[in-house]
Amino acid sequence: MSEALVATQAPGTDTPVPGASGARSFWRRLRAQRAALVAAVVVALLVLVALFAPLLTALEGQDPTTYHPSLIDSARGGVPVGSFGGMSAHHWLGVEPQTGRDLFARLVYGARVSLGVALAATVVQVVIGITIGVAAALGSRWVDQLLSRVTDIIVAMPLMIMSLALLAIVPSSFPRPVLVTLVIGLIAWGNIAKIVRAQTLTLKGLDYVSAARLSGWGTWRIARRELLPGLAAPVITYAALLVPINISVEAALSFLGVGVKPPTPSWGQMLTAADVWYQAAPQYLLFPAGALFVTVLALTVLGDGVRTALDPRAASRLRVGAGRRRGAGTGSGKGADA
């Protein structure tokens, strides 16, 4: 990580002041936030579950698509046989109503879809946002005006309505996880483009960028060598907060029936199928809803922790506050002595 990642601007000047230890400073600030560390552990476990879903289901001896009609009570409308939704040594979380598919297998494979779509959509948003934002800030006045107006239109578009419209007209033969990823990524890049444009305009006025321009460097070389490192902190911060938003959007689209289609498992799709079973088989609703809640909460807390750790003013604010408190305490002591 370059020093430009943690460079700040000295008060009253345009001179960048590099952070004391770069990556070490970031990790020190992040480790100081216990909630962010717990969230990071939870996110890491969820990623491992998604990556090793085939291994976990093999240990259980099940898969997410095999039907088990013998485990369904057809006389009661398809409710799983046995207590707690058919939980057993062979079906750790029970089975799905009506189909008898293993609930644990569908849950861990659903993590692959939900996390994969959210992360891939975030990458698409970041790439488009950085490209448009930097091009608008470094381009001519007309280029800036054009790209800024396009960005305003993208920001004003209602994400859910546009996603519903696009997903409804695309042929069902197109892979749905890829389609959902592209739809979310291509519609929701406007905010990050605005952030990148504003930050690039700020960085353009710094001395080291002006020096690079005077030395004869081209526009895109300056962008690659001088501006992109300075954009890393705000982009990483916003991207960390985009992931839980994209998970919620994917779950909502699947819940509305236009996202990932069966038999591919998805948490939002499982919630859609569970809305009529919350009384007869409550675990079918509670497990995917709980997994979605924990994932979004952990990613949100982690994103906020990353934002705080990357904020070069956070430590200075703490130091100033501590200094004021010490000064106030010293002054009060002197007053008492007097």
Image (cartoon, rainbow, N blue to C red):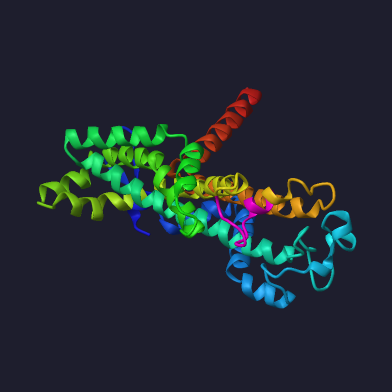
Q: Quadrant of residue 114?
A: bottom right
Measuring 79% from the left and 67% from the top, which residue is drawn there? Answer: 69
Does the magenta run of residues contain 264?
yes
Residue plotted at (60% across, 44% down): 256
Quadrant holding the C terminus: top right
Answer above or below: position of 53 versus 291. Answer: below
Q: Going 52% across and 50% down the picture, which residue do you hit?
A: 243
x and y percent of residue 59 in the render? Answer: 71, 77
Q: Position of residue 247 (x, y in %)?
A: 56, 50
Vertical comparison of 57 with 281: above or below: below
Residue at the (54%, 32%) spot, across then down: 324
Q: Nearer the viewer, residue 31 or 223?
A: 223
Viewer-closest of 134 and 25: 134
Residues shaded magenta: 259-271
Left or right for 273, reference 191: right
- Judged left or right of residue 308, residue 296 is right
Expressed as whole percent of the image width and height from the top left, the position of residue 138 reads: 21, 42
Visible residue check, residue 191: yes
- Residue 220 position within the rendered picture, expressed as x and y whole percent measured from the top left: 19, 52
Question: Is 142 within the magenta?
Answer: no
